[in-house]
Image (cartoon, rainbow, N blue to C red):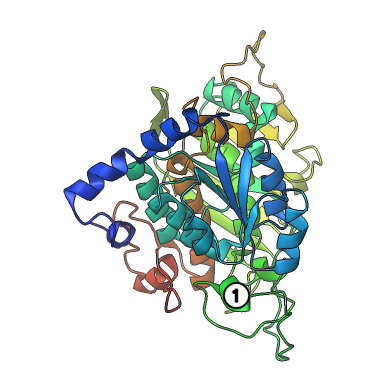
Amino acid sequence: MSQASRTSRRGFLKTGAAAGAFSTLGLSRTLAVLGSPNGLLQVGVIGVGGRGAANLAGVAHENVVALCDVDANTLAAARTGFPKAAGYADFRKLLDRNDLDAIVVSTPDHTHAVAAMAALKSGRHAYCEKPLTHSVAEARALTEVARETGLVTQMGTQIHAGANYRRVVELIRGGAIGEVNQAHAWVGKSWGGGERPTEVPPVPATLDWDLWLGPAPARPYHPTYHPANWRRWWDFGGGTLADMGCHYLDLVFWALGLSHCTKVEASGSPPHPETAPTKLRVRWQFPARRQAKTPMPECQVVWHDGGLRPKLFADGKLPDWGDGVLFLGSDGMLLADYGRYQLLPLPDAKKVPAAPATPLPQIPESIGHHNEWTEACKGVGTPLCNFGYSGPLTESVLLGTVAYRLQKPLVWKWRTMETPGVPEAQALVRPEFRAGWSL
Protein backbone atom coordinates (compact mmCIF):
# COMPACT_ATOMS: atom_id res chain seq x y z
CA MET A 1 0.00 0.00 0.00
CA SER A 2 1.33 3.46 -0.89
CA GLN A 3 2.15 6.09 1.71
CA ALA A 4 -0.63 8.23 0.28
CA SER A 5 -3.09 5.39 0.77
CA ARG A 6 -1.95 4.94 4.36
CA THR A 7 -2.25 8.68 4.98
CA SER A 8 -5.71 8.96 3.47
CA ARG A 9 -7.06 6.18 5.66
CA ARG A 10 -5.28 7.01 8.90
CA GLY A 11 -7.59 7.69 11.77
CA PHE A 12 -10.94 6.99 10.16
CA LEU A 13 -10.86 3.72 8.22
CA LYS A 14 -9.45 1.57 11.00
CA THR A 15 -12.11 -1.12 10.90
CA GLY A 16 -14.37 -2.82 8.40
CA ALA A 17 -17.34 -1.37 10.25
CA ALA A 18 -16.02 2.16 9.64
CA ALA A 19 -15.54 1.43 5.96
CA GLY A 20 -19.09 0.12 5.73
CA ALA A 21 -20.44 3.21 7.41
CA PHE A 22 -18.57 5.43 4.97
CA SER A 23 -20.05 3.61 1.99
CA THR A 24 -23.53 4.82 3.01
CA LEU A 25 -22.61 8.48 3.59
CA GLY A 26 -23.37 9.66 0.06
CA LEU A 27 -26.78 7.98 0.04
CA SER A 28 -27.72 9.21 3.52
CA ARG A 29 -26.79 12.79 2.64
CA THR A 30 -28.83 12.63 -0.56
CA LEU A 31 -31.85 11.21 1.26
CA ALA A 32 -31.58 13.94 3.89
CA VAL A 33 -31.78 16.64 1.23
CA LEU A 34 -34.65 14.97 -0.64
CA GLY A 35 -36.53 14.70 2.64
CA SER A 36 -36.10 18.36 3.58
CA PRO A 37 -39.17 20.63 3.36
CA ASN A 38 -37.93 22.66 0.38
CA GLY A 39 -35.51 20.19 -1.20
CA LEU A 40 -32.62 22.65 -0.89
CA LEU A 41 -29.11 21.83 0.22
CA GLN A 42 -27.87 23.29 3.47
CA VAL A 43 -24.52 24.70 2.30
CA GLY A 44 -21.45 25.99 4.08
CA VAL A 45 -18.83 28.01 2.20
CA ILE A 46 -15.20 28.10 3.37
CA GLY A 47 -13.32 31.06 1.90
CA VAL A 48 -15.60 33.80 0.57
CA GLY A 49 -13.23 36.28 -1.10
CA GLY A 50 -11.92 36.18 -4.67
CA ARG A 51 -12.90 32.84 -6.21
CA GLY A 52 -14.86 32.20 -3.04
CA ALA A 53 -17.20 35.09 -3.82
CA ALA A 54 -17.82 33.65 -7.29
CA ASN A 55 -18.46 30.17 -5.90
CA LEU A 56 -20.76 31.60 -3.25
CA ALA A 57 -22.79 33.19 -6.03
CA GLY A 58 -22.71 29.85 -7.87
CA VAL A 59 -24.48 28.04 -5.01
CA ALA A 60 -26.72 30.92 -3.91
CA HIS A 61 -29.76 29.06 -5.32
CA GLU A 62 -29.41 26.64 -2.39
CA ASN A 63 -29.76 27.45 1.30
CA VAL A 64 -26.42 28.98 2.34
CA VAL A 65 -26.43 28.73 6.13
CA ALA A 66 -22.76 29.16 7.10
CA LEU A 67 -19.84 31.24 5.82
CA CYS A 68 -16.20 31.09 6.86
CA ASP A 69 -13.18 33.29 6.24
CA VAL A 70 -10.05 34.05 8.25
CA ASP A 71 -10.36 37.72 7.23
CA ALA A 72 -13.20 39.39 9.15
CA ASN A 73 -13.57 42.13 6.55
CA THR A 74 -14.02 39.60 3.75
CA LEU A 75 -16.47 37.62 5.85
CA ALA A 76 -18.51 40.71 6.71
CA ALA A 77 -18.75 41.70 3.05
CA ALA A 78 -20.01 38.24 2.10
CA ARG A 79 -22.57 38.18 4.89
CA THR A 80 -24.26 41.32 3.57
CA GLY A 81 -25.67 39.14 0.81
CA PHE A 82 -26.52 36.28 3.19
CA PRO A 83 -27.53 37.99 6.44
CA LYS A 84 -29.05 34.83 7.92
CA ALA A 85 -25.87 32.79 7.44
CA ALA A 86 -23.69 32.21 10.50
CA GLY A 87 -20.09 33.43 10.27
CA TYR A 88 -16.90 31.65 11.30
CA ALA A 89 -13.15 32.28 11.14
CA ASP A 90 -12.19 28.61 11.67
CA PHE A 91 -13.61 26.11 9.16
CA ARG A 92 -13.39 23.35 11.75
CA LYS A 93 -16.02 25.14 13.85
CA LEU A 94 -18.23 25.51 10.80
CA LEU A 95 -17.99 21.75 10.24
CA ASP A 96 -19.06 21.13 13.84
CA ARG A 97 -22.58 22.12 12.82
CA ASN A 98 -24.96 19.21 12.32
CA ASP A 99 -27.21 20.86 9.73
CA LEU A 100 -24.84 20.98 6.72
CA ASP A 101 -25.24 18.82 3.61
CA ALA A 102 -22.51 20.22 1.40
CA ILE A 103 -19.34 22.30 1.64
CA VAL A 104 -17.64 24.65 -0.83
CA VAL A 105 -13.89 25.20 -0.34
CA SER A 106 -12.34 28.31 -1.93
CA THR A 107 -9.34 28.98 0.30
CA PRO A 108 -5.74 29.44 -0.95
CA ASP A 109 -4.23 26.25 -2.38
CA HIS A 110 -2.34 25.22 0.76
CA THR A 111 -5.55 24.79 2.75
CA HIS A 112 -7.67 23.13 0.03
CA ALA A 113 -6.89 19.59 1.14
CA VAL A 114 -7.34 19.99 4.90
CA ALA A 115 -10.70 21.71 4.46
CA ALA A 116 -12.03 19.43 1.70
CA MET A 117 -10.86 16.30 3.52
CA ALA A 118 -12.49 17.45 6.75
CA ALA A 119 -15.73 18.01 4.83
CA LEU A 120 -15.63 14.50 3.35
CA LYS A 121 -14.71 12.88 6.64
CA SER A 122 -17.63 14.64 8.30
CA GLY A 123 -19.96 13.16 5.68
CA ARG A 124 -20.55 16.29 3.58
CA HIS A 125 -20.48 16.55 -0.20
CA ALA A 126 -17.56 18.73 -1.31
CA TYR A 127 -16.81 21.30 -4.00
CA CYS A 128 -13.19 22.51 -4.07
CA GLU A 129 -11.52 25.17 -6.19
CA LYS A 130 -8.68 24.28 -8.54
CA PRO A 131 -6.05 23.05 -8.20
CA LEU A 132 -7.69 20.39 -6.06
CA THR A 133 -4.75 20.39 -3.64
CA HIS A 134 -1.32 21.88 -2.93
CA SER A 135 0.60 18.59 -3.16
CA VAL A 136 0.47 15.37 -5.16
CA ALA A 137 -0.11 13.17 -2.10
CA GLU A 138 -3.02 15.35 -0.98
CA ALA A 139 -4.67 14.92 -4.39
CA ARG A 140 -4.31 11.16 -4.19
CA ALA A 141 -5.73 11.08 -0.67
CA LEU A 142 -8.78 13.17 -1.59
CA THR A 143 -9.40 11.04 -4.67
CA GLU A 144 -9.37 7.85 -2.60
CA VAL A 145 -11.54 9.17 0.21
CA ALA A 146 -14.11 10.58 -2.23
CA ARG A 147 -14.36 7.12 -3.80
CA GLU A 148 -14.58 5.38 -0.42
CA THR A 149 -17.29 7.64 0.95
CA GLY A 150 -19.44 7.83 -2.17
CA LEU A 151 -19.99 11.54 -1.54
CA VAL A 152 -20.55 13.95 -4.43
CA THR A 153 -17.50 16.00 -5.39
CA GLN A 154 -16.54 18.62 -7.95
CA MET A 155 -13.38 20.64 -8.61
CA GLY A 156 -13.81 24.26 -9.65
CA THR A 157 -12.75 24.11 -13.29
CA GLN A 158 -15.76 26.07 -14.44
CA ILE A 159 -14.80 26.17 -18.14
CA HIS A 160 -15.38 22.39 -18.25
CA ALA A 161 -19.09 23.25 -18.47
CA GLY A 162 -18.59 25.36 -21.61
CA ALA A 163 -20.03 24.22 -24.94
CA ASN A 164 -16.77 24.82 -26.84
CA TYR A 165 -14.80 22.36 -24.72
CA ARG A 166 -17.45 19.73 -25.39
CA ARG A 167 -17.32 20.19 -29.14
CA VAL A 168 -13.51 19.93 -29.11
CA VAL A 169 -13.66 16.74 -27.07
CA GLU A 170 -16.15 15.26 -29.56
CA LEU A 171 -13.96 16.16 -32.53
CA ILE A 172 -10.78 14.72 -31.01
CA ARG A 173 -12.49 11.52 -29.86
CA GLY A 174 -14.25 11.24 -33.21
CA GLY A 175 -10.94 11.15 -35.07
CA ALA A 176 -11.25 14.52 -36.83
CA ILE A 177 -7.45 14.91 -36.84
CA GLY A 178 -6.55 11.22 -36.60
CA GLU A 179 -4.44 9.77 -33.78
CA VAL A 180 -3.13 12.46 -31.44
CA ASN A 181 0.38 11.93 -30.10
CA GLN A 182 1.14 15.46 -28.92
CA ALA A 183 -0.73 18.34 -27.31
CA HIS A 184 0.32 21.77 -26.07
CA ALA A 185 -1.28 24.24 -23.67
CA TRP A 186 -0.03 27.75 -22.94
CA VAL A 187 -0.91 30.94 -21.06
CA GLY A 188 0.76 34.34 -20.96
CA LYS A 189 0.15 34.82 -17.25
CA SER A 190 3.14 34.80 -14.91
CA TRP A 191 2.72 34.09 -11.20
CA GLY A 192 6.35 33.98 -10.11
CA GLY A 193 9.44 35.70 -8.81
CA GLY A 194 10.13 37.71 -5.70
CA GLU A 195 12.12 37.51 -2.48
CA ARG A 196 10.84 36.89 1.02
CA PRO A 197 10.08 40.24 2.70
CA THR A 198 12.44 41.28 5.50
CA GLU A 199 10.12 43.79 7.17
CA VAL A 200 7.55 42.52 9.69
CA PRO A 201 4.45 44.71 9.69
CA PRO A 202 1.72 44.13 12.27
CA VAL A 203 -0.98 41.62 11.48
CA PRO A 204 -4.25 43.42 10.65
CA ALA A 205 -6.70 43.21 13.55
CA THR A 206 -9.28 41.64 11.25
CA LEU A 207 -7.03 38.77 10.06
CA ASP A 208 -6.34 35.49 11.89
CA TRP A 209 -2.86 34.93 10.46
CA ASP A 210 -2.27 31.60 12.19
CA LEU A 211 -5.45 30.17 10.67
CA TRP A 212 -4.53 31.60 7.26
CA LEU A 213 -1.19 29.76 7.45
CA GLY A 214 -2.95 26.52 8.38
CA PRO A 215 -0.65 23.56 7.58
CA ALA A 216 2.02 25.73 5.90
CA PRO A 217 5.33 26.49 7.67
CA ALA A 218 5.09 29.45 10.04
CA ARG A 219 6.32 32.82 8.82
CA PRO A 220 5.57 36.45 9.73
CA TYR A 221 2.59 38.15 8.15
CA HIS A 222 3.20 40.42 5.19
CA PRO A 223 0.68 41.93 2.73
CA THR A 224 2.58 40.36 -0.18
CA TYR A 225 0.96 37.03 0.75
CA HIS A 226 -2.64 37.98 1.48
CA PRO A 227 -5.03 38.37 -0.29
CA ALA A 228 -3.70 37.29 -3.73
CA ASN A 229 0.05 37.11 -4.22
CA TRP A 230 0.30 33.88 -2.25
CA ARG A 231 0.12 32.08 -5.62
CA ARG A 232 3.76 32.85 -6.41
CA TRP A 233 5.06 31.35 -3.13
CA TRP A 234 5.80 27.60 -2.98
CA ASP A 235 4.57 27.32 0.61
CA PHE A 236 1.09 28.46 -0.44
CA GLY A 237 0.65 28.00 -4.20
CA GLY A 238 2.31 26.60 -7.29
CA GLY A 239 2.76 29.56 -9.61
CA THR A 240 1.11 29.88 -13.00
CA LEU A 241 0.97 26.14 -13.67
CA ALA A 242 -1.00 25.42 -10.49
CA ASP A 243 -3.25 28.41 -11.13
CA MET A 244 -4.09 27.80 -14.80
CA GLY A 245 -3.00 24.23 -15.59
CA CYS A 246 -6.22 22.65 -14.36
CA HIS A 247 -8.16 24.87 -16.79
CA TYR A 248 -6.23 24.45 -20.03
CA LEU A 249 -4.85 20.96 -19.41
CA ASP A 250 -8.38 19.92 -18.45
CA LEU A 251 -9.31 20.05 -22.15
CA VAL A 252 -6.31 17.87 -23.04
CA PHE A 253 -7.06 15.32 -20.30
CA TRP A 254 -10.73 15.15 -21.19
CA ALA A 255 -10.32 14.84 -24.94
CA LEU A 256 -7.47 12.32 -24.79
CA GLY A 257 -8.74 10.30 -21.83
CA LEU A 258 -5.57 10.89 -19.82
CA SER A 259 -5.04 9.92 -16.21
CA HIS A 260 -1.53 9.32 -14.82
CA CYS A 261 1.70 10.32 -16.55
CA THR A 262 4.78 8.06 -16.67
CA LYS A 263 7.48 10.73 -17.06
CA VAL A 264 7.76 14.48 -16.48
CA GLU A 265 10.50 17.06 -16.99
CA ALA A 266 10.53 20.84 -16.74
CA SER A 267 12.63 23.91 -17.49
CA GLY A 268 12.23 27.62 -17.09
CA SER A 269 13.63 30.67 -15.40
CA PRO A 270 16.29 29.92 -12.74
CA PRO A 271 14.73 28.07 -9.78
CA HIS A 272 14.22 29.88 -6.50
CA PRO A 273 13.64 28.14 -3.15
CA GLU A 274 10.77 30.48 -2.19
CA THR A 275 8.92 31.44 -5.36
CA ALA A 276 7.66 29.95 -8.61
CA PRO A 277 9.26 30.69 -12.00
CA THR A 278 8.25 33.61 -14.20
CA LYS A 279 8.54 31.29 -17.23
CA LEU A 280 7.98 27.56 -17.29
CA ARG A 281 7.85 24.69 -19.78
CA VAL A 282 6.81 21.18 -18.69
CA ARG A 283 6.69 17.94 -20.71
CA TRP A 284 4.68 14.93 -19.58
CA GLN A 285 4.64 11.51 -21.20
CA PHE A 286 1.41 9.49 -21.06
CA PRO A 287 1.02 5.82 -21.94
CA ALA A 288 -1.18 4.32 -24.61
CA ARG A 289 -4.74 3.78 -23.36
CA ARG A 290 -8.33 3.23 -24.49
CA GLN A 291 -10.95 5.96 -24.54
CA ALA A 292 -14.54 4.73 -24.98
CA LYS A 293 -13.12 1.48 -26.46
CA THR A 294 -10.99 3.45 -28.95
CA PRO A 295 -7.22 2.81 -28.75
CA MET A 296 -5.19 5.98 -28.20
CA PRO A 297 -1.42 6.10 -28.69
CA GLU A 298 1.28 7.14 -26.26
CA CYS A 299 1.40 10.92 -26.24
CA GLN A 300 3.40 13.89 -25.02
CA VAL A 301 1.75 16.91 -23.39
CA VAL A 302 3.63 20.21 -23.14
CA TRP A 303 2.84 23.23 -20.96
CA HIS A 304 4.17 26.76 -21.63
CA ASP A 305 3.65 29.91 -19.53
CA GLY A 306 5.08 33.36 -18.89
CA GLY A 307 5.14 34.18 -22.60
CA LEU A 308 6.52 30.85 -23.81
CA ARG A 309 4.52 29.21 -26.60
CA PRO A 310 4.88 26.29 -29.04
CA LYS A 311 7.52 26.85 -31.73
CA LEU A 312 4.84 26.59 -34.40
CA PHE A 313 3.79 30.15 -33.56
CA ALA A 314 7.26 31.50 -34.32
CA ASP A 315 7.32 29.42 -37.51
CA GLY A 316 4.11 31.08 -38.68
CA LYS A 317 2.19 27.80 -38.74
CA LEU A 318 -0.55 28.94 -36.35
CA PRO A 319 -2.91 31.93 -36.24
CA ASP A 320 -1.83 34.43 -33.60
CA TRP A 321 -4.27 33.54 -30.86
CA GLY A 322 -3.73 34.22 -27.19
CA ASP A 323 -3.88 31.51 -24.49
CA GLY A 324 -4.95 28.14 -25.81
CA VAL A 325 -4.51 24.46 -26.55
CA LEU A 326 -3.16 22.69 -29.63
CA PHE A 327 -3.70 19.04 -30.56
CA LEU A 328 -1.38 17.50 -33.19
CA GLY A 329 -2.82 14.44 -34.90
CA SER A 330 -1.81 12.15 -37.74
CA ASP A 331 -4.26 13.93 -40.09
CA GLY A 332 -4.19 17.54 -38.91
CA MET A 333 -4.19 19.93 -35.97
CA LEU A 334 -6.88 21.44 -33.78
CA LEU A 335 -6.36 24.82 -32.09
CA ALA A 336 -8.73 25.81 -29.28
CA ASP A 337 -9.28 28.27 -26.48
CA TYR A 338 -12.17 28.76 -24.07
CA GLY A 339 -14.66 29.90 -26.69
CA ARG A 340 -13.53 28.76 -30.18
CA TYR A 341 -11.65 26.12 -32.13
CA GLN A 342 -10.10 25.82 -35.56
CA LEU A 343 -9.07 22.79 -37.60
CA LEU A 344 -5.69 23.27 -39.30
CA PRO A 345 -3.42 21.33 -41.66
CA LEU A 346 -0.23 19.77 -40.33
CA PRO A 347 2.84 22.06 -40.63
CA ASP A 348 4.10 20.29 -43.78
CA ALA A 349 0.67 19.84 -45.40
CA LYS A 350 -1.97 22.04 -47.01
CA LYS A 351 -5.11 19.99 -46.58
CA VAL A 352 -7.33 21.14 -43.72
CA PRO A 353 -9.00 18.21 -41.89
CA ALA A 354 -12.71 18.09 -42.51
CA ALA A 355 -15.15 18.65 -39.69
CA PRO A 356 -18.17 16.30 -39.58
CA ALA A 357 -20.89 17.38 -42.01
CA THR A 358 -23.49 17.38 -39.23
CA PRO A 359 -21.65 17.66 -35.90
CA LEU A 360 -24.43 16.51 -33.61
CA PRO A 361 -23.48 17.03 -29.95
CA GLN A 362 -22.75 13.78 -28.15
CA ILE A 363 -21.85 15.30 -24.78
CA PRO A 364 -24.99 16.90 -23.33
CA GLU A 365 -24.90 20.62 -22.64
CA SER A 366 -24.13 21.42 -19.02
CA ILE A 367 -26.74 22.73 -16.62
CA GLY A 368 -23.92 24.82 -15.14
CA HIS A 369 -20.75 23.81 -13.36
CA HIS A 370 -22.07 24.54 -9.86
CA ASN A 371 -25.52 23.18 -10.72
CA GLU A 372 -24.00 19.86 -11.83
CA TRP A 373 -22.69 19.48 -8.28
CA THR A 374 -25.72 20.72 -6.36
CA GLU A 375 -28.13 18.59 -8.39
CA ALA A 376 -25.92 15.52 -7.98
CA CYS A 377 -25.94 16.12 -4.23
CA LYS A 378 -29.71 15.67 -4.52
CA GLY A 379 -29.30 12.45 -6.49
CA VAL A 380 -29.57 13.80 -10.05
CA GLY A 381 -26.64 13.28 -12.43
CA THR A 382 -22.88 13.11 -11.88
CA PRO A 383 -20.48 16.08 -11.87
CA LEU A 384 -17.93 15.69 -14.67
CA CYS A 385 -15.08 17.23 -12.64
CA ASN A 386 -15.55 14.93 -9.66
CA PHE A 387 -12.42 14.10 -7.66
CA GLY A 388 -12.06 10.81 -9.51
CA TYR A 389 -11.29 12.83 -12.64
CA SER A 390 -9.79 16.00 -11.21
CA GLY A 391 -7.54 14.22 -8.70
CA PRO A 392 -5.31 12.60 -11.37
CA LEU A 393 -5.38 15.85 -13.38
CA THR A 394 -4.14 17.76 -10.34
CA GLU A 395 -1.47 15.13 -9.65
CA SER A 396 0.05 15.55 -13.10
CA VAL A 397 -0.09 19.34 -12.93
CA LEU A 398 1.68 19.39 -9.56
CA LEU A 399 4.28 16.83 -10.67
CA GLY A 400 5.34 19.46 -13.18
CA THR A 401 6.24 21.83 -10.34
CA VAL A 402 8.14 19.03 -8.56
CA ALA A 403 10.27 18.30 -11.64
CA TYR A 404 10.96 22.00 -12.09
CA ARG A 405 11.96 22.63 -8.47
CA LEU A 406 14.39 19.70 -8.54
CA GLN A 407 15.61 20.46 -12.08
CA LYS A 408 15.49 16.73 -12.76
CA PRO A 409 13.33 14.55 -15.01
CA LEU A 410 11.11 12.17 -13.07
CA VAL A 411 9.89 8.68 -13.82
CA TRP A 412 6.51 8.41 -12.11
CA LYS A 413 5.30 5.10 -10.70
CA TRP A 414 1.79 6.30 -10.08
CA ARG A 415 0.41 3.25 -8.30
CA THR A 416 3.02 3.50 -5.52
CA MET A 417 3.71 7.23 -5.99
CA GLU A 418 7.44 6.53 -6.28
CA THR A 419 10.12 8.45 -8.22
CA PRO A 420 12.88 5.89 -8.95
CA GLY A 421 16.38 7.34 -8.84
CA VAL A 422 15.19 10.67 -7.43
CA PRO A 423 14.33 9.98 -3.78
CA GLU A 424 14.52 13.67 -2.91
CA ALA A 425 11.33 14.21 -4.91
CA GLN A 426 9.31 12.56 -2.15
CA ALA A 427 9.71 15.57 0.14
CA LEU A 428 7.84 17.64 -2.47
CA VAL A 429 5.35 14.92 -3.40
CA ARG A 430 4.46 14.51 0.30
CA PRO A 431 5.39 17.73 2.10
CA GLU A 432 5.04 17.75 5.88
CA PHE A 433 2.31 19.71 7.61
CA ARG A 434 2.93 22.20 10.38
CA ALA A 435 2.38 20.75 13.85
CA GLY A 436 -1.31 20.55 14.74
CA TRP A 437 -2.50 19.96 11.17
CA SER A 438 -3.19 16.74 9.32
CA LEU A 439 -5.48 15.14 6.78
Amino acid residing under circle 1? Pro
Q: In which quarter of the image is residue 360?
A: top right
Q: Position of residue 259 (x, y in %)?
A: 43, 42
Residue 67 image position (x, y, % from top left): 63, 55
Position of 263 with respect to 349 (left or right) is left
Question: Residue 39's image quarter?
Answer: top right
Q: Residue at x 68, y 40 (%)?
A: 60
Q: Which of 65 and 75 is in front in this view?
A: 65
Q: In this view, does 94 lie to the left or right of 70?
A: left
Foreground residue among 352 and 91? 91
Q: Mark 1 points at which residue?
A: 271
List the single residue furthest toward the left.
16
Q: What percent of the width, then of the height, locates residue 56?
A: 68, 47
Front in this rendered view, residue 371 or 29: 29
Can residue 315 be seen at all in this image of the molecule? yes
> Which secondary structure, mark 1?
loop
Point out the image quarter for the N terminus.
bottom left
